Amino acid sequence: MANYRGGRINEEVKKEVSDIIRNSIKDPRIKAMVSVTDVRVTKDLRYAKVYLSIFSTKKEEEEETFEAIKGSAGFIRKEIGHRINLRYTPEIIIELDKSIEQGMHIDSLLEKIKEK
């Protein structure tokens, strides 16, 4: 699989997973805003790691939303299989992406240094 093809598959899966989470999952536990930040499909198309950022003011709401989405990984896989024509439908592995929070923390530390 060429590197270019891998990037196209990653972007297509990312777009479809984002649409599925936004429009198809009807779980009442999903209360926070969810953003799909990255998708990495393995070269053999067997697994897809989906990185999510969850934006919420309450920590328990964030955890509840993450568990609801993680629990619907089978549904997401089934929908990906219907929407994207691939040899194998990748198994969905959902990971929490904390890079935005880490970036905000580093930015606040830099601001404190500037003040001194």
Image (cartoon, grey):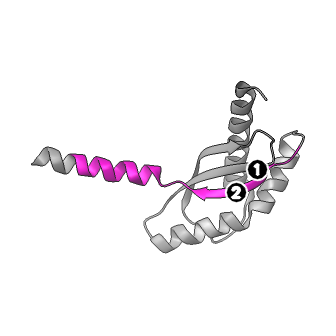
Please, what secondary structure does the residue beneath circle 1 have? strand
Q: Nearer the viewer, residue 63 or 29?
A: 63
Residue occupying image coordinates x 67% and y 48%: 18
Q: Decide: is 38 above or below 67.
A: above
Q: Which residues are magenta?
A: 88-110
- Whether 90 is among the magenta residues is yes
- SS assignment at label 2: strand
Give left or right: position of 13 versus 61: right
Where in the figure is residue 70, as x and y percent of width and height? 68, 64
Q: Which mark is residue 93?
A: 2
* For residue 34, above or below residue 2: below
Image location of residue 28, percent across then percent down = 66, 71
Report the side of 64 relative to 90 (left or right).
left
Q: Residues at badges 1 and 2 in contact (C-beta under 8 Å)?
A: yes
Residue at mark 1: 47
Q: Amino acid type of disc 1?
A: Tyr
The answer to whether residue 42 is left or right of residue 38 is right
Q: What's the residue at 23%, 46% (across, down)?
A: 110
Residue 30 in sight in this render: no
Cα distance in 3D space between marks 1 and 2: 7 Å
What residue is rendered at 68% in x and 36% in y? Answer: 11
Disc sitting over residue 66 in the figure: none
